Structures are given as structure tokens and as C-alpha cells.
């Protein structure tokens, strides 16, 4: 990690003033990605402006029924907020699927939007990467690309935005609010993130020197029926292979009246699937229409041999999530009689929880023919 | 700087005899943070070392900006091949660090930067750049790789190729055959404590604290490398944060730290970063196994063949003994087992928990499952029908073999009976459900070891045995063995371990540690007991007995010795994503006498968890363009997290085997890790009807064929 | 301490340094309350809270398993919340209350979570253990506060039924390579019960 000067900001205005006048200064909030990247030498700021103690406000209801989320609100607090849980469940679901309990306690709303890709070439300063070092080439396209993007990518960069929160925010029409020396500005999440184009170094359209102060969620009735589903290589504490945030409303005739879909781990940006949305409004809320819409959206995918599976993955996730939001269940064709429906909530002999304290007693060979012990439970 | 001898008072109200579930002696230190691991020792005047690694796959260093880096404030030394002292060959090419300008793999140490502080060392190492004449890179293993050859022997000295009967003829004559290829990914041991060393030179003697699995071996290696008398090297490893084979011998870190301390005249501490663990700590080679099975319609094997391919670096030959377990597992008159090795421009593979067995048994037990399906025969029954009378490879009698009992008991515990053999038909909500079984085997071996037992005035005993506690519970079990043999309560035993000044002993590895160290402790304890029984007086300095078991090992009977197990697994596959989960595992083992029921259960289950992780999560992704393992951190190299592990049931049979070391145990460090991956793969095939033959099994390998949910 | 080094291999900059911050490196003086004791120290701005604890305050209970927030071994409580101390710059923790594994026990009496880990053999090598324990302490508070997790079925319900599935998910930010998970889960339940019993006793 390169040496750097450190300054603790006392208020938003002075933080913005310092950031604006100091080239190569960075704002430090939770630090979960910035410190990580500084250790790797990927980020090498000369000055850190610590904004972690600034009061950006909490989660407050807006007059129109929307929410204003202060940039400093920690991911765990945002996920737990009663209004988020009831009005924007996709956001809670996205937040709690991300990282770990510790990291969610540290990561902030503003900082999370600015996290960088976890492409292994970007993270390793000894390797080519146009996002980190323009002109060095994209190492991933011919190298390791399994986790990387298929939409909005180009020959310069196939990185993905790694986050979960921003995918939900994209689906929920959120707006990013930031302060600049010229005053407060706003960008819808959709316009906040940018595709690599001819400059993959820039992940967002946040002006240099600006400081995110809040995220606003509009009043969005469809969002009460929303969720987030994330596929990954292990069940927790892993970045997505693909994810979907969606909201859906269906009328009495079974037709889609409103729908929001965003795809994660698919693109350098949280990918708002507007083509799919447009195709779905007015269509019957059936798995077939959901699949057709997903395929329409993904027709533009540019894949490598390693990440081509993401087309099928995202299609299945979209169909699964929308079907769930539409209340379509296929329990009828279950054939696993007597098997617990949730694979990890066993309710039988093995499943107990909150059992009273009992020492680990692996029955030893002395007790029975065979030494035996179950999960340390149920004793 | 003194290593602290742990003598924890023991609660005498609980049974402490051999087999009893005694709590770990160092447990309190571990839960309070008092247990110090290597890097947590900070001697006065310590300097911080940081390893700089090559950024090319092969090549020659032609220059560097060393002078610039040396001028950075706080930098004490920058040691490249031009400054490093000459090292003698200790029969490990990877340890000859900084000896030439040649680069043999990406990530090879090319310098050690030594600085006043941790942060300065890290930044200086990152500022250090080298110019290279870049060479070609050849890093991808294949069964047609031109460099493939048959090494003289494979790891642990096993035979490279063996053949009995005529496999080709049996395959041609048989109505039911399997001829499939199974692959396992490069796997990284990934102990939670990265390798670390604190090295100090005092009056020409080298004193190191090092995170390893056996200090005797590391000390011998250091003595050779630095041309020192063995008595001039001391290595200690009081607490070790896991190893799983990766700390089985000296690794570059201990050599580099010793060089740094030699040059600066100050203690130097060096730790690997997690990223470095993917290049210079060892790992399990990727493997390719062609398995052929021929059977009659009743499932009796007429041929069993396993042709294994693996890779090593150009610096050091290491051949995973992938086909070795197959030699001893199932009966079949015609047998062919071979190993071929490609030497590539890659980091050096080493031991990882159950070397040979973990990938090899995955392959053969997957093939057995495929055969069972073809025969429409229950997979447990197929195995029972191929149970050998004697070791099918050596013809020797087994010292004990209760594999069928493990299978039967496991089936009972798991609820296997009445299993619907059809694949891809059980669905619950989003999930396809399946079950799988596999056998497990691992050799029970003993290595030479010494021990020292001293009767002290007042009735206490001091026991010195160079065991290493890497989490398996060696400290506790050695104390139990000693107390049991000496006939005293545990708290009368003062135990000293993990110090090369103790009588020479082998590593915590190969599931042989407890048998080997324990035998030596047993022998010494018995001799002391006998002397005391003869009325020998205890002098003020104590009555000391030092023993070695090399001769005892030589007199062991002519038996084939293995531990066995049966693994049963339920797997579920999410139709929306192809994600696989394993809610339930059952493992039943026959491993001789179990020394500590508490730590043994933990160790079996830990092995099973690692097997699950191998099956579903772990995937060292070699970057063909860069020559390294690109996913070199814990965010991208996934090991099983808590959420991945559901119910694990562990049971062991009460197995008495008179042909082992005197305590009667077979070793349990690896057996839990064997067969688990095959059981998972078999369960996934049963759930989905899709047979994935390359681990790990991940969504991208299932999605194309997976049925849709709607 | 003198080592025998031949002239040609002598280090160029050998000094009798003290491990102090090199000249010219930006530093900041901070105060931290660690396990109830105030500490004032001048830190290199680059120093992580984890390194400050381990290398400066000799509180080595908090472990370094990855140094990038990918394993959880460094977990401590910062102002009561579980935190990966490797990703916190010490300078940014100015004024915080930090509790490490060394600060959990009450004299000789172990914290209920520590005791439960001992009783359940919920560790093997012990390297992830301090992080698991601190994480559990923080996690139990989060669950009591009704914070939802990825596996919470009904996220609109403020009550958390802390079953096995919840414990596994909530502790997944603490990797254990020895595979002690199956004992960690019941240990957490034991600790939760001990806490509940204590609370009940206190309010009775």
C-alpha cells in the first residue's frame, strides 16, 4: 500500500471541496473495497478523505411515499429497516445475500455503489487490464472469464459490477444523489453506472470530486411484490454467478400490469432488462412468457466459452423469480414424498435447534457396537 | 523469545483414558486468543520480510530497480539472487530460492524485501520490479502432453505402474464395461493460518519459529541448505493453524526468512499472503483418471484399471499416487494401474489431505456408481460383491478390513434401504433430490519416531515427543497415551511437542502421526514404568528414558493395513440455477482404535467437509495465458462455508486390530476426506441424471442438460 | 544479538532500528479503547486496525487469514458491531471501542460463547476461532435485534427464529478450513440459550 495523507472530513461541503481540489484523492467510507484494493496496489490514492463519520442522514420516508437513504447507512441497517423490508423487499433480499454479516456492518450505501469489479485481472497489478491500466488489454477475454460479463461488454472490458444492492436499486428505479462543488446533482441508477465504451476505467458517471450523499427510492407499488435471487458457487459469502432483482404485478386476468427486472453479474453495470419488461407488460404471467422475455433480453449477449452458461442461468433465474412473484407453484408435481421441501431446514431427528446445552457426547465404542453421534443435537 | 510450553490444568472429574472424549489441552488458549501462532511472536528488533514474486511464467531476470527500492525509507535490505547466500541442495528444487536469475513458474520468489515495518515491507516489495527475458510457458496438463513420462516411483514411494492379468482382454470379453475419464481441479490446502516464519541467527545458529507439520524435517532441511550442523538449527511450531499437507515440509518462506535474518543480523518475520498461498505453499495437482471396469452380469469385476495423469513443476518431481488406492480397493483378476507425469512451468504440487486417495477414489468410486447403474444393481451391493479376501494387489492378508460393515452400517444410518435407483425423478419444489454412496480407504502407516519420558521426583512425568498439533488434537492425544501408559492422571504429565530439539520424529501427515509418535511415547512410558517398578530411584534431575521405534517398525507383521469408510450423501440441485447443496452426509469408518472420541469425531467430519468442498466448490483455475492460478484468494477460490454444510453424522466401528502400533489405531486424518467427493458426484447423478466427470460440480456444468422447472 | 554473516552478504542498510515508522511516512496519532483500556498511538496511515492490534498492541488473538475481508478470522467488535478489522484503517477507527477475543472473558470466567466453543469442540486448529467467537457475539445481538438474513423466510417479521439454517448463514463470513462447522452451530445455540437463561434470570 502506497503512503497517503489522511484527513477526516467535518462536513459534506468541506469533504467535497477537498476532493474537488485534490487530484488523486479518494473518499473513505466503510473501506471494505477501497482498503482491499489499496493493499493490492490497485488503488493508490495520495489522500484519503474519511467521510465515515459524516451525517448523511438515515432512512427517511419522502413525502411521496418513497425513501431517502443516507449514503452512510450501513448495508445491514438498510436491510433491516422496516420500510425497506415491507415496501422494497428486493432490496433487503439483495443486501442480505451480499458478502458477510461483518462486511454488511461496514459497507455503506454510497460506498457499495462505487465498488469495483472483482475481475481477477483487475485485482492483480501484474496482469493486463484496461480498466486498471488503459492500453494493457483485457486479459480475461482469452483467459479466465467464467464469472464475467455478457451484456454491455466489449473487446476492451468484460468486467462485471460485482454488487447485489445496486441490482435491486436498478430494478427499483432508484436515484443516486451526490454533492459537487456546484451543488447537489442526481442520476438515476440506470444512468449512474456506465458501460465500458472506449474508457473502461470509469465505472460510473459520478463526476470527479463528487461525493454520494444519498440514494432515493421512488414510491413504487409494484415493489412490495419484489425479490432478489442470486446464484453462486457456494451458498453464502460469494459473489454472484448471476442474479435477478424483480418486481411484478399481475391483474385478475393473469396479465402482467407492471414489472421490473434487473440482472446482476451479467454486465459492467447492474443490467436493467427493459426489453424483457416491455415485452412482458400486457402478456400473460406464465413461465413461457417469462422465458421468452428473458431470451429477448439476452439475445444481445456476447459470451466466451467459459461464461456462455450465464445465458441459460439468467433465463432460468428470471423465470423462477417471476413465477414465484406471480404465485405460480409447481408443488403438485413433487415426487419426493416425505422429503423436506427446504433442503437445509431439516425438521426431523437431525434438525433440532435451540436444544439445551449438552456436551458433545460422541457415543464411544464402549457404549454400543458402534460409536455414534449425530450433529451434536437432539441429545 | 521463548516458545511457551503449554501445560494446561486438566479437569480430573472427567474420564481421560485412551478413547475418552478429552477436551483439547490448549482449548482455553485457543478460545481466549492466548495461543500464539508463529507470526504472533515479535522478538526485539524484529524486521518484516515480504516476498516479491516473478510476474512471468518462465524467463531470466536481466535487471531490476533494486537500488531505488533499497533507498526507500525504512527498507533494510532487498535480497535478490545477486545477494542471497549460496544454498546447498536439500533434494527439493523449490527451496533453492534466489539462487539464479532463472524463473521456473509465475509467482516464484525473486526477492525478499526486509523493512522496519509491515506496511513499508509490503509497499517496497510492490515497488520492486524486474526486467525479464521472457520465456515460453507450458502450463496445461493433458493426456497427450508430450512431456508425459513414467516417474521411477510415485509419492510415498509407491510403484508407478502395476499390472496383473489382461485388462484389454477382459474388457473385450465382458458384457458390461465402463471406460470413462474423471478429472479433479487443482486444489489448494488453504489452511486458515498462512505459512509464516520468525527466523533469528544467534552466534551462527539458526533459531526459527515456523508454521509447519513437522519440525524435525524442517530443521534437517535448513541444516542442509545453510550447511549447518544439525545441532545448530532449532525449529519450533507450537501452534499451527492447519496445514492439510501444505506444511508437511519446509516451504520457501522459512528459507527466505532465514536468509533475511542472516543478512540483516536481526530477527526477521515473514508470512505468506493469502494470494501467495496459491503459488508457493503447495497444492494438489489437477488429476486426470481413465478408469476402466469390466464386470459380469452379476457385477463381479473381471477387470479394474486406473490410468492416472498429473503434473509437477520443472523444479521438483512430485507425482500424486492417484491410482495407488485403486490397487487395494476391489477384487478383479485383471488389473492395470499406471501413473504419468507432465513437468510444466507451474508451481510445485505437494501433498494435500489424502494425496492419491482423494482424487483417485473419487474416480474409481464414480466409475463403480456408473457400473451399478448400468447393471441395475444397488451401489452398496455392487461393492459388497467385489470385496476382496486378501489385498488384491499384494496378496497379503488385511490386518483388518471392515469396509462391508461400514457400508452396511452407513446404509442403515442413512436410510438407504429401498432407495429408488432411477435418476432424475425425485423433485421437491425447486429441487431435484438424489443420494449417493462411495467407499473410502487410506493406508495405516507408521514412521520412525523417538520420544523421551522422564519421571520426576514427586510423581510428575515430563513427556517430550516431536508431534505437531495442527488441529487434529495431537497434543491432547499424546498426553492421553502417556498418562494411560504411565497409569497417572493427565495433569501429572507435562508434555513438550513441536520442537526439533526433541527426539527426531516425522510429520503430522499421512495419517501416521498418532501411530508413530504414540508408539514412541508408549514405548518410553512402558520402560519408565518398568524401571520404577523395579525400584529404580528417581534422581533430582529425573529418571529419563529416550527411545526410538525404527526397529520396532521393522518387526511389524506382513499385513496389508488400511483404514476404511463408507460415505453416504444426499444432494439437491436447484432447477432455477443449477446450484447444488448437500443437506446430509453420513460417514462410517473403521480405523482401528479411536484415541479420543471428541477430537476424532471432529476430524472425521472435517475431512468429510473438505471432501464436500472438493466436490462442489474448490477450483484452482489455471490461467493458460498468464501461467498462474488466477483465482488466488478466498473470494474467488471457494472453500465450503458454514452454510454449505448441513447435517453430518459420523460413526466409527469398534475395530480391534492387533497388527498395528501398540495403541491399535489406524490414523484418521485423511480417511474422512476420501470418497466424500465421489458420494456427492454420485448423488448429483442420481438427482439429475447428469454425470459430471470433472470436479468441482458447479452450475455451469449442469445447466445445459438440467430439466427445466416449468 | 549478532549473527555470523560474511562480509559479502552483509546487508547494506543494517541499523539498529526499532521497528518505528520510517521518516517521511504520513502518520496520525489516534486513541482507541481496546477491551476497556485506552490506547494512544501514532500509526502509519496505512496500518490496518488488525495490524495495529497484532503488531503494535500485542493483541494477537485476532487473526490474519486473508487480510482482505474474505475469511473473517480478523473479526472484532467495533462499537459493539462485528467487523473485519483487516479492512479498517486504524486511523479511521479513531475513538472507537474495540473488543477483541482477549476482552470477552470476565476474569477467569469465559464468555458464554467461548465456553460453548470449548464444550462443543467447535474448533480444531484454532486459527479461525477468535473470529468465529467474536462474530458469534455480534451475530447474536443482530439476531436479537431482529435483523434479517439471506435465509430468513419472512423478512417482514421482526422476530428471528435462530434455527440451524440461520446460524449457518449468519456465520458464513467466518471460514473454517478444519471443517468445525458442524460443532460451531450447536455451540452457537448453547451460547444463545445461556444468554437467554441469563437474561431471563436477570429480569425475573
Image (spheres, helix red, strand yellow):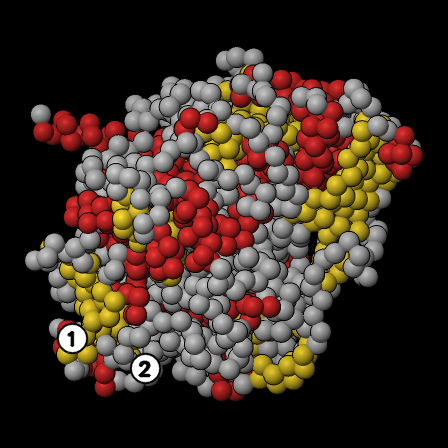
Residue under the point 70% across and 21% down: B377
Dot 1: chain letter: A
Residue in front for this viewpoint, A140 or B521: A140
Q: Where residue B219 sits in the image (x, y, percent)? A: 62, 55
Q: According to the image, label 1 marks what residue?
A: A184
Q: Is residue B629 visible?
A: no
Q: According to the image, label 2 marks what residue?
A: A24
Residue under the point 84% across and 52% down: B150
Q: Is residue A70 visible?
A: yes
**Secondary structure beneath label 2:** loop
Q: Crowding near pointer 1: few (<14 within 10 Å), some, many (20+)?
A: few
Residue in front for this viewpoint, B670 or A50: A50
In the image: residue A300, left or right of residue B554:
left
For residue A134, which numbered disc appears in the image? none
Q: CA distance from mark 2 to mark 1?
A: 22 Å
Q: Quadrant of residue B316?
A: bottom right
Q: Where residue A98 sits in the image (x, y, percent)? A: 35, 52
- Quadrant where the image shows the C terminus of chain C: top left
Q: Where residue B380 sits in the image (x, y, percent)? A: 66, 22
Residue under the point 59% across and 66% down: A143
Where B167 sits versus B223, above or below?
above
Amino acid at each position: 500500500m502506497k503512503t497517503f495523507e489522511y484527513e477526516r472530513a467535518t462536513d459534506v461541503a468541506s469533504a467535497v471541496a477537498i476532493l474537488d481540489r485534490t487530484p488523486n484523492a479518494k473518499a473513505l467510507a466503510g473501506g471494505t473495497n477501497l482498503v482491499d484494493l489499496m493493499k493490492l496496489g490497485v488503488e493508490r490514492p495520495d489522500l484519503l478523505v474519511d467521510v465515515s463519520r459524516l451525517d448523511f442522514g438515515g432512512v427517511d420516508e419522502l413525502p411521496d411515499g418513497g425513501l431517502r437513504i443516507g449514503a452512510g447507512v450501513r448495508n445491514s441497517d438498510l436491510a433491516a429497516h422496516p420500510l425497506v423490508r415491507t415496501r422494497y423487499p428486493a432490496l433487503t433480499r439483495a443486501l442480505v445475500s451480499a458478502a458477510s454479516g461483518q462486511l454488511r456492518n461496514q459497507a455503506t450505501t454510497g460506498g457499495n455503489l462505487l465498488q469495483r469489479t472483482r475481475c481477477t485481472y483487475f485485482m492483480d497489478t501484474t496482469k493486463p487490464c484496461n480498466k486498471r491500466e488503459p492500453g494493457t488489454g483485457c486479459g480475461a477475454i482469452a483467459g479466465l472469464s467464467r464469472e464475467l460479463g455478457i451484456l454491455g461488454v466489449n473487446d476492451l472490458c468484460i468486467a462485471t459490477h460485482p454488487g447485489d444492492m445496486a441490482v435491486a436499486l436498478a430494478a427499483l428505479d432508484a436515484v443516486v444523489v451526490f454533492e459537487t462543488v456546484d451543488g447537489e446533482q442526481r442520476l438515476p441508477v440506470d444512468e449512474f453506472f456506465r458501460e465500458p465504451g472506449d474508457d473502461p476505467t470509469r465505472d460510473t458517471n459520478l463526476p470527479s470530486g463528487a461525493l454520494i450523499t444519498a440514494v432515493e427510492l421512488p414510491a413504487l407499488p409494484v415493489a412490495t411484490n419484489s425479490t432478489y435471487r442470486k446464484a453462486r458457487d457456494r451458498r453464502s459469502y460469494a459473489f454472484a454467478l448471476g442474479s435477478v432483482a424483480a418486481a411484478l404485478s399481475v391483474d385478475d386476468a393473469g396479465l402482467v400490469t407492471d414489472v421490473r427486472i434487473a440482472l446482476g453479474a451479467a454486465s459492467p453495470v447492474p443490467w436493467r432488462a427493459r426489453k424483457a419488461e416491455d415485452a412482458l407488460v400486457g402478456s400473460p404471467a406464465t413461465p413461457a412468457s417469462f422465458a421468452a422475455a428473458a431470451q429477448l433480453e439476452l439475445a444481445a449477449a456476447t459470451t466466451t466459452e467459459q461464461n456462455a452458461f450465464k445465458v441459460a442461468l439468467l433465463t432460468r433465474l428470471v423465470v423462477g423469480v417471476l413465477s414465484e412473484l406471480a404465485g405460480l407453484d409447481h408443488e403438485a408435481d413433487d415426487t419426493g414424498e416425505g422429503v423436506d421441501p427446504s433442503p437445509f431446514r431439516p425438521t426431523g431427528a437431525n434438525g433440532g435447534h435451540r436444544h439445551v446445552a449438552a456436551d458433545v457426547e460422541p457415543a464411544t465404542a464402549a457404549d454400543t457396537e458402534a460409536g455414534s453421534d449425530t450433529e451434536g443435537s437432539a441429545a | 523469545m521463548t516458545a511457551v510450553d503449554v501445560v494446561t490444568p486438566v479437569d480430573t472429574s472427567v474420564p481421560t483414558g485412551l478413547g475418552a472424549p478429552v477436551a483439547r489441552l490448549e482449548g482455553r488458549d485457543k478460545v481466549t486468543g492466548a495461543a500464539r501462532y508463529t507470526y504472533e511472536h515479535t522478538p526485539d528488533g524484529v524486521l518484516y520480510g515480504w516476498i516479491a514474486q516473478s510476474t512471468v511464467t518462465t524467463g531470466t531476470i536481466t535487471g531490476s530497480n533494486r537500488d531505488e527500492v533499497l533507498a526507500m525509507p525504512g527498507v533494510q535490505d532487498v535480497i535478490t539472487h545477486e545477494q542471497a547466500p549460496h544454498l546447498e541442495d536439500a533434494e527439493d528444487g523449490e527451496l533453492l530460492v534466489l539462487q539464479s536469475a532463472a524463473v521456473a513458474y509465475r509467482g516464484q520468489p525473486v526477492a525478499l524485501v526486509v523493512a522496519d515495518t509491515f506496511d513499508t515491507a509490503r509497499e517496497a516489495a510492490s515497488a520492486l520490479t524486474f526486467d525479464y527475458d521472457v520465456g515460453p510457458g507450458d502450463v496445461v496438463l493433458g493426456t497427450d502432453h508430450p512431456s508425459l513420462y513414467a516417474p521411477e516411483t510415485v509419492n510415498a514411494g509407491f510403484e508407478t505402474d502395476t499390472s496383473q492379468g489382461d485388462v484389454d482382454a477382459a474388457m473385450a470379453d465382458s458384457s458390461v464395461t465402463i471406460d470413462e475419464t474423471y478429472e479433479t481441479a487443482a486444489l489448494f490446502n488453504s489452511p486458515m493460518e498462512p505459512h509464516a516464519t520468525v527466523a533469528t541467527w544467534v552466534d551462527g545458529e539458526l533459531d526459527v519459529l515456523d508454521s509447519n507439520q513437522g519440525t524435525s524435517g524442517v530443521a534437517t532441511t535448513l541444516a542442509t541448505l545453510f550447511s549447518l550442523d544439525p545441532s545448530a538449527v532449532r525449529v519450533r511450531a507450537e501452534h499451527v493453524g492447519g496445514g492439510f499437507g501444505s506444511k508437511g515440509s519446509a516451504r520457501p518462506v522459512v528459507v527466505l526468512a532465514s536468509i533475511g535474518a542472516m543478512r540483516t543480523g536481526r530477527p526477521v518475520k515473514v508470512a505468506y499472503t493469502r494470494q501467495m498461498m496459491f503459488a508457493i505453499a503447495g497444492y494438489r495437482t489437477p488429476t486426470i483418471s481413465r478408469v476402466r471396469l469390466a464386470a459380469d452380469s452379476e457385477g463381479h469385476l473381471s477387470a479394474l484399471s486406473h490410468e492416472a495423469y498429473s503434473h509437477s513443476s520443472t523444479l521438483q518431481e512430485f507425482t500424486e499416487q492417484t491410482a495407488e488406492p485403486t490397487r487395494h480397493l476391489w477384487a478383479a483378476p485383471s488389473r492395470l494401474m499406471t501413473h504419468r507425469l507432465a513437468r510444466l512451468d507451474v508451481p510445485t504440487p505437494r501433498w494435500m489431505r489424502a494425496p492419491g486417495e482423494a482424487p483417485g477414489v473419487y474416480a474409481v468410486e464414480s466409475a463403480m456408481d456408473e457400473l451399478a447403474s448400468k447393471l441395475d444393481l444397488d451401489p452398496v451391493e455392487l461393492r459388497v460383491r467385489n470385496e476382496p479376501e486378501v489385498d488384491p494387489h499384494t496378496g497379503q492378508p488385511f490386518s483388518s478390513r471392515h469396509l462391508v460393515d461400514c457400508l452396511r452400517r452407513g446404509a442403515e444410518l442413512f436410510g438407504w434401504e429401498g432407495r429408488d435407483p432411477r435418476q432424475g425423478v425425485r423433485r421437491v419444489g425447486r429441487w431435484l433430490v438424489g443420494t449417493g454412496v462411495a467407499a473410502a480407504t487410506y493406508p495405516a502407516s507408521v514412521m520412525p519416531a523417538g520420544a523421551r519420558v522422564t519421571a520426576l521426583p514427586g510423581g510428575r512425568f515430563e513427556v517430550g515427543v516431536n508431534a505437531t498439533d495442527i488441529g487434529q488434537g495431537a497434543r491432547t492425544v499424546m498426553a492421553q497415551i502417556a498418562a494411560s501408559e504411565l497409569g497417572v492422571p493427565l495433569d501429572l504429565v507435562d508434555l513438550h511437542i513441536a520442537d526439533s530439539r526433541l527426539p527426531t520424529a516425522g510429520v503430522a501427515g499421512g495419517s501416521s502421526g498418532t501411530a508413530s509418535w504414540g508408539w514412541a511415547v508408549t514405548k518410553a512410558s512402558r520402560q519408565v514404568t518398568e524401571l520404577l517398578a523395579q525400584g529404580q530411584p528417581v534422581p533430582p534431575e529425573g529418571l529419563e528414558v529416550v527411545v526410538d521405534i525404527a526397529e520396532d517398525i521393522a518387526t511389524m507383521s506382513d499385513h496389508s493395513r488400511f483404514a476404511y469408510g463408507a460415505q453416504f450423501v444426499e444432494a439437491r440441485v436447484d432447477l432455477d440455477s443449477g446450484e447444488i447443496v448437500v443437506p446430509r452426509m453420513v460417514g462410517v469408518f473403521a480405523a482401528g482404535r479411536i484415541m479420543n472420541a471428541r477430537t476424532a469425531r471432529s476430524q472425521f467430519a472435517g475431512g468429510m467437509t473438505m471432501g464436500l468442498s472438493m466436490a462442489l466448490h474448490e477450483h484452482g483455475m489455471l490461467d493458460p495465458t498468464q501461467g498462474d492460478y488466477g483465482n488466488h484468494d478466498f473470494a474467488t477460490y471457494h472453500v465450503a462455508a458454514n452454510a454449505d454444510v448441513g447435517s453430518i453424522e459420523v460413526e466409527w466401528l469398534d475395530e480391534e486390530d492387533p497388527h498395528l502400533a501398540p495403541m491399535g489405531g489406524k490414523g484418521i486424518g485423511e480417511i474422512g476426506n476420501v470418497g466424500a467427493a465421489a458420494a456427492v458426484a454420485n448423488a448429483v447423478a442420481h438427482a439429475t441424471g447428469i454425470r459430471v466427470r470433472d470436479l468441482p460440480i458447479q452450475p455451469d456444468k449442469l445447466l445445459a442438460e438440467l430439466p427445466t422447472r416449468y | 544479538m549478532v549473527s555470523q554473516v560474511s562480509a559479502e552478504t552483509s546487508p547494506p542498510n543494517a541499523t539498529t532500528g526499532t521497528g518505528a515508522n520510517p521518516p517521511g511516512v504520513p502518520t496520525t496519532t489516534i486513541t482507541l479503547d481496546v477491551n476497556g483500556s485506552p490506547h494512544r498511538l501514532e500509526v502509519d496511515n496505512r496500518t490496518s486496525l488488525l495490524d495495529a492490534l497484532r503488531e503494535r498492541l500485542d493483541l494477537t488473538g485476532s487473526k490474519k487469514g486473508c487480510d482482505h475481508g474474505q475469511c473473517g478470522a480478523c473479526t472484532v467488535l467495533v462499537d459493539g458491531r462485528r467487523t473485519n478489522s483487516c479492512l479498517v484503517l486504524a486511523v479511521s477507527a479513531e475513538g472507537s471501542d474495540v473488543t477483541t477475543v482477549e476482552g470477552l472473558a470476565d476474569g477467569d470466567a469465559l464468555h458464554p460463547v467461548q465456553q460453548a466453543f470449548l464444550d462443543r469442540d467447535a474448533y480444531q486448529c484454532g486459527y479461525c476461532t477468535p473470529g468465529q467467537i467474536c462474530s458469534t457475539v455480534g451475530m447474536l445481538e443482530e439476531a436479537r435485534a431482529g435483523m434479517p438474513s439471506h435465509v430468513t423466510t419472512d423478512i417482514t417479521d421482526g422476530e428471528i427464529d435462530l434455527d440451524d439454517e440461520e446460524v449457518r448463514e449468519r456465520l458464513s463470513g467466518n471460514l473454517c478450513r478444519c471443517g468445525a462447522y458442524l460443532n460451531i452451530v450447536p455451540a452457537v445455540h448453547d451460547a444463545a440459550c445461556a444468554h437467554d437463561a441469563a437474561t431471563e434470570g436477570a429480569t425475573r
